[in-house]
Image (cartoon, coloured by chain):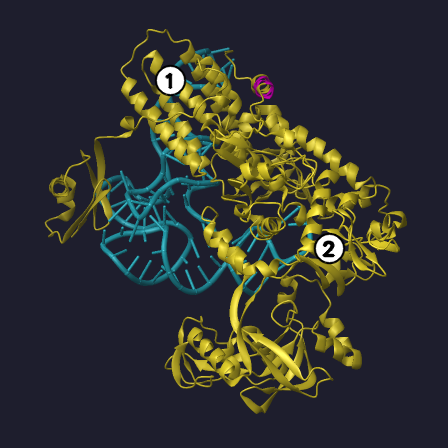
Amino acid sequence: MSSRYEPSVIETKWQSAWDEAGVFTAKADPAKPKYYVLEMFPYPSGRIHMGHVRNYTMGDVVARYKASCGFSVLHPMGWDAFGMPAENAAMERGGHPRDWTYGNIADMKAQMKPLGLSIDWSREFATCDPEYYGQQQAMFLDMLEKGLVYRKAAVVNWDPVDMTVLANEQVIDGKGWRSGAAVERRELTQWFFRISDMAGDLLDSLDGLTHWPEKVRLMQANWIGKSRGLQFAFETVGAPEGFDRLEVYTTRPDTLMGASFAGISPDHPLAKALEAQDPKIAAFVAEARRGGTTEEALQTAEKLGMDTGIRVKHPLDPARELPVYIANFILMDYGTGAIFGCPAHDQRDFEFASKYGLPIPSVFVAEGAQEAPLAEAFTPAKSEPVQYIRGVVTNRVMTGDEALAEAIKLAEDKGFGQGVTKFRLRDWGLSRQRYWGCPIPVVHCPACGVVPEKKENLPVELPYDVSFDKPGNPLDRHPSWRDVACPNCGAAAKRETDTMDTFVDSSWYYARFTSPRAQTPTVAADADYWMNVDQYIGGIEHAILHLLYSRFFARAMNETGHLPARSREPFEALFTQGMVTHEIYKTTDDKGRPVWHLPEEVIRTDEGATLKDGTPVEIIPSAKMSKSKKNVVDPMNIIAAYGADTARWFVMSDSPPERDVEWTAAGAEATHKHLSRVWSLCSRIGTMPADHTGPGDTDLRKATARAVEEVTRSIESFAFNKAIAGLYAFTNTIAKADASTPVMKEAMRTLGQLMSPMTPHIAESIWAYQGGQGLCARAPWPKADPALLVDDTVTLPIQINGKRRAEISVAKDLPAPEVEKLALAHEDVVKFLAGNPVKKIIVVPGRIINVVA
RNA sequence: GCCCGAGUGGCGGAAUGGUAGACGCAGCGGAUUCAAAAUCCGCCACCGCAAGGUAUGUCGGUUCGAGUCCGACCUCGGGUACCA
């Protein structure tokens, strides 16, 4: 062992050793339990960032730990390679999305390799490989046959200047990002997965996901949004032909007597009928359809409504007629696209009624209160009892939940409506009017209609000869690709030019990793052995969409015979990690515009920061690392300066993994110093005379056992920061210990092993130097001797009225009455009690004593 | 707007309802050195001379005991169905 810690030397050496031994190649071994650990695969942007390092290091810690616990581990990596950035790059800088993407993949892989991750690279693939997306097309056809896919009209963001569909992130303040034109909502016929048919199952099965974070299950449950409500039809007065009834859905049927208007979405069929007849309504509807399609944009936009002149009869009092408004905040996708407004008990309806001068009749008041004009809507929780004054029930105190159940029963008895269960979850629109995605393998034939492509013709490959000089989808203007013969009748037909949402690609890659080169989407034997994913790790930003779509897709794959039934929930355990953040450095140019600076351009001082030429720099508190603010730290610089082990150790230390971590240069420097200290400690112990003895054998053995126990427990519970804190403490203990040589060596070798999931390279060097057999990466995980973990005395703090005043040291199993006696006799206790009588004394064995005076 | 989180020393953070601040960074003092770097040893929440008091975003509650449980609020972050 050389005297200096030289990461660049040992890291390349051990990486070659692992490669030669094939340590990380996943092998299905029936004699061993299997463990599948997966990190959410990256989008190939071209550069890895610290967030990637953190994500993959976490997965690597788990993979290496499980391997040393005797599992046959699958730890693969791939690329989420379709998506908009590749097309944007082609438009901005020329070049082709495919070349750009594969170039980025090569660059990123070259940056990931030096991290020493225990990845089985033989299973690598990119979702833009025709071998991958061809299998995805095959599954699409199976799902089409099973009725899991269908077409219907849905709204998109339409840029009327560029004549193209925009993604939500391309709509900024209601305007197109390039053209600046006001965006409109426009309907197109698009492909959908029937995810809403599985809403009940997707909701109920959340209960079984006991190793998922509670918050993720809650977010998914709210997103699926099961509700019980009343569906009924208003009889209309003065509506166009065919609209003599207006179906509405409400989750608060108990407030029906407080209805003061009915409202329909601008996309409701009735609105469309009126639009065709009445130019004033057409103008209003056009205005109401302005802006983006996001729920956020719809819910935060100014509430606008227009009286259609149509009236509806109140179902409980046909003499009462309510006006029908078209209102921009009503979603066509939820319920029936029509509502009744109860302004007294819904804040949005209240604002609407106030704006348009509609009455605001109360249905209930707080218990014991009198009816009075309202300044805002009264909206207590449905579980709270209130006094009904004008309800379906009258002059009774009951909760909203009780009242709405009665209201549903009444409607059913009277026959004007029925209780129904609805879900907020909508079907998954997968059509994208873009080039760089998986082509939807169907053909539109004038005679046969929509015809699936024949499976033997798959993959339907993207054509390479396309240009991005005009807005819109290049597939639309590619005649030789688009114009084909109908697979059914052979007549002239056209390919579907929409491609699939990239969420489709990422909804089954975990299954493909089990047989990445197969000529079918999956292979039963491989899927049976490796599925499910035992530990999935990724960002909290994927809590809803990606994870919900993957859960749906696993079900759909099961129903089309591509996954076993027990894989309908594909992820056994989920961990969501936080972001890596950094300070932002800003100066201002002579025109007052902000200028951002990379961390390496900035010199930190005690007072603040400057550029190299002395210009003072403003420091903005930490935020997610982003290229535009330049607060990015390139992992490659860290690895070049300190080595991969330092980068890995640092991203795992300090912050708990589910929280954001602040990157600081000082922290990386400190980590490197620590690893150097470990290195020289190892070197010192290695040269101790074999016959050295010391008084600390028992203490060091106990400390070693405690370290094994603590680090193991911390890794098992994803508390990597605590594992590292324990390793710091254990290192200090060894450094100060005076024990005999074999005990010192044993402690040092154990330290190296406990470090190995985090810092595998230095761990191999320690292992080899302290006489470990073979590779540390293949050595079994150490076990703590339980006998060394028990202490026979315990220190108990003594509180008086909840404040700590003294402490005593007692035998571990001393009976409580004895402990009480000792505590009350303690001189500080006597002093603080000052003769006051003791009312009560609480002894929590092994924990604390509280004297109440 | 709606859904979900998070807020603890100068900083990152630790703490089965039971001694708040483990471990690390920064800082301070010392040893070593001609000197410095590196290394090693020690100190380190705040107020107070001390006794002691005050402290986990804010306000209130439950409890012998609250960072932890409950209620209201504030700030920041994630998601909001075409960013991935």
Which chain is represented by cyan in the image?
A: B
**The one of A326 and A102 positioned closer to us in this rendering:** A102
Would you place residue A496 above or below residue A348 in this image? above
Q: Dividing the picture into quarters, in which one does residue A708 lie? A: top left
Chain letter of mark 2 equals A
| Residue at (54% x, 63% y) in the render | A225
Residue A579 is at least partly visible in this image: yes
Residue at the far bottom: name it. Answer: A319
Q: Quadrant of residue A707?
A: top left
Q: Is the residue at mark 2 from the same chain as the one at mark 1?
A: yes
Residue A73 image position (x, y, % from top left): 53, 31
Q: Is residue A553 above or below residue A190?
A: above
Kind of residue sitting beneath label 2: Ser
Task: Give the labeled residue for mark 1.
Answer: A746
User: Which segment is the magenta one?
Assistant: A13-20
Asked if disc 2 and disc 1 are in contact, CB closer than 8 Å, the reply is: no
Image colour for chain A is yellow
Q: Which residue is nearer to you in this view: A757 or A313?
A: A313
Closer to us: A203 or A298: A203
Residue A338 in the figure: left or right of residue A714: right
Residue at which label 2 appears: A431
Q: Is residue A351 above or below residue A498?
A: below
Residue A829 or A437: which is nearer the viewer? Answer: A437
Residue A305 pos. (x, y %): 67, 77
Crowding at dot 2, Cα within 10 Å, few <14 / some 14-19 / many 20+, comes out as: many
Total tally of numbered discs in the picture? 2
In the image, residue A634 lies at what x, y percent? 63, 33
Say which residue appears at 58% left-offset and 37% top-offset: A525
Q: Secondary structure at mark 1?
A: helix
